[in-house]
Amino acid sequence: MPSLLDGGRARSDEPRNCAARRIVAVERKASHDMSNEATSLCRMANDLHRQGRHSEALAAYDRAIELNPCYPAALNNRGVVLLAVGQAAKALESFERAVSLQPDFAEALYNRANALRGLKRIPEALADYDRAIAVRPNYAMAFNNRGATLQELERPLEALESYDRALALSPSYADAWENKAILQSEFGEVEGARRALETLIRAEPRRARAHFQLVRMKRMTREDPQLPVLEALARERNAMGEKEAVDISFALGKAYDDIGEYELAFAHFAEGNALKRAGIVYNEVGTLAHLRRIASAFTPDAVDALRGLGDATAAPIFIFGMPRSGSTLIEQILSCHPDISARGEVDAFERAAADVANADGRSLSLPEMFSLLPAEQLSAIGRRYLEKMRVEGEGAKRTTDKKPSNFLYAGLIHLALPGARLIHTRRNAIDTCWSCFSQRFADVGMPSAYDLGELGRFYCAYDTLMEHWRRALPEGAILTVDYEDVVADLEGQTRRILAHCGLAWNDGCLEFHKSRRHVRTASAGQVNQPLYKSAVGHGRNYERFLAPLMNELAALSRPDLAGQALVAAE
């Protein structure tokens, strides 16, 4: 908690008149008493906050500020509590008042940056972390959070430097070690990351996030010393916060899956998913209706009528499909081609479409924006996307955009960027859904993934929309690449993909696992090792637990997918 300021009133000139002096003395005493009371209230509020009594703490801070409106520390600490209870917008207001009173208040600048991050105002957050560091150059926490912000801005090398600065200032700073290790693993430096996390866990065995990340970086065995520590922590889950309990559940699920104890693995995955599902709002009816409306808007006739009006630039390659369907693998393969610049998961197309469609102040989303969009605006969407991706001036001939949910935008992408190449990654339905269910996505991630029935219904809706795109778009507009085919014939499928992208063969694509590019997805660990076949048909190990999912997948428009997992492992 930042140190408190006393907020006392500045001393005024001494009046000459005796009566006036007595009046001023009384006023000063009253002001002094109010300032003392405000300070006492603020200290009490700090204690209440530490005890988790947030409502009482806020009431005490409010009373302190009422007594002394020019009290930066109380305003700052009030913002800290508001952040703790998830009210980032109100917290931001409190921090801004504190900074306006004391512009060099390093803690308030740091906390304002935290609030801005919570509100997804990432560039502004980075600027505030830099301001806090300018005031206090040895501010290790600011360097650590600055690193996380740089990661969100897709500046991972600068993020590593920021974590290193934090650790140089505070060598035992556990959060910075944890963040640096995770980022190292995303660059393929898995051994170094594992050693750092193992050291951290030995010092702090209750760090749930470190346990989860470490389990992801290795194959567990029954003899692994981490396993009994995880099992002990699982028995204390009721005393943990929600995020910590989720991390431990998914870590144990992965551990038991590695060992082959599938019943125990499923129990822990199910528990983690239930905890995660309870903490999010997911409008399933609205989501599924949204996918149906997209198909209704992009009829074959509507697409034909607008074809050829977009920006003809051929640079972008869009890779999309269900999460965990192999899109990261395909991008990693392509990233090793000298004519390709891989950009990872970005939301540039969605934002470009919204910018153009809502330039007049409207608030339209797909598919309504398509229905109301003037035809000449299609090329504007394409140009806006290219600006966001900074394609102009790129040395590479093509850039990849690997955002799985771009399958929603396939029709609009084709019209706005008719020269772009579209790649749909597909995997066996059960394997895909099981991989989603057993993956702890960041933040809300994929909201339909945490309940087997909801997951199955979303998969069917996705499959139906992809079948619609096959009919509505010209033949060959989308190349479908099956994960199982890539595993069975890496070179053949890579040649097929490169031909679709209009690129010459390059042997380096077959050695994708040697690349040390930054991969910030759940599949980072997999694509930094040679291709393996154990993931094909893996969902079959859990089939007896998946009745809610299997019942929904029975309605697939291509029923062969539902049975594919049963054949793949034989």
Image: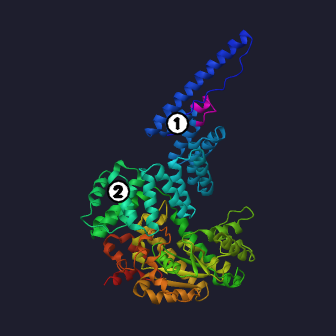
Residue 270: name its quadrant: bottom left
| Element carrying mark 1 | loop
Q: Answer with mark 1 or mark 2, whichever residue precedes in sequence.
A: 1
Label 1: which residue? 3
Query: Is the residue 364 above or below the residue 139 in the image?
Result: below
Query: Is the residue 69 above or below the residue 22 in the image?
Result: below
Segment tinted magenta in the rendering = 64-72
One can see residue 380 in this view = yes
Label 2: which residue? 199
| Element carrying mark 2 | helix
Which amino acid lies under the numbered mark 2 shown in the image of this protein?
A: Thr
What percent of the width, then of the height, locates residue 384? 69, 71
Query: Is the residue 28 above or below the residue 255 in the image?
Result: above
Please report the residue visible at 49 percent of the width from the left and 65 percent of the height from the top.
446
How many labels, in total?
2
Query: Is the residue 239 above or below the residue 272 in the image?
Result: above
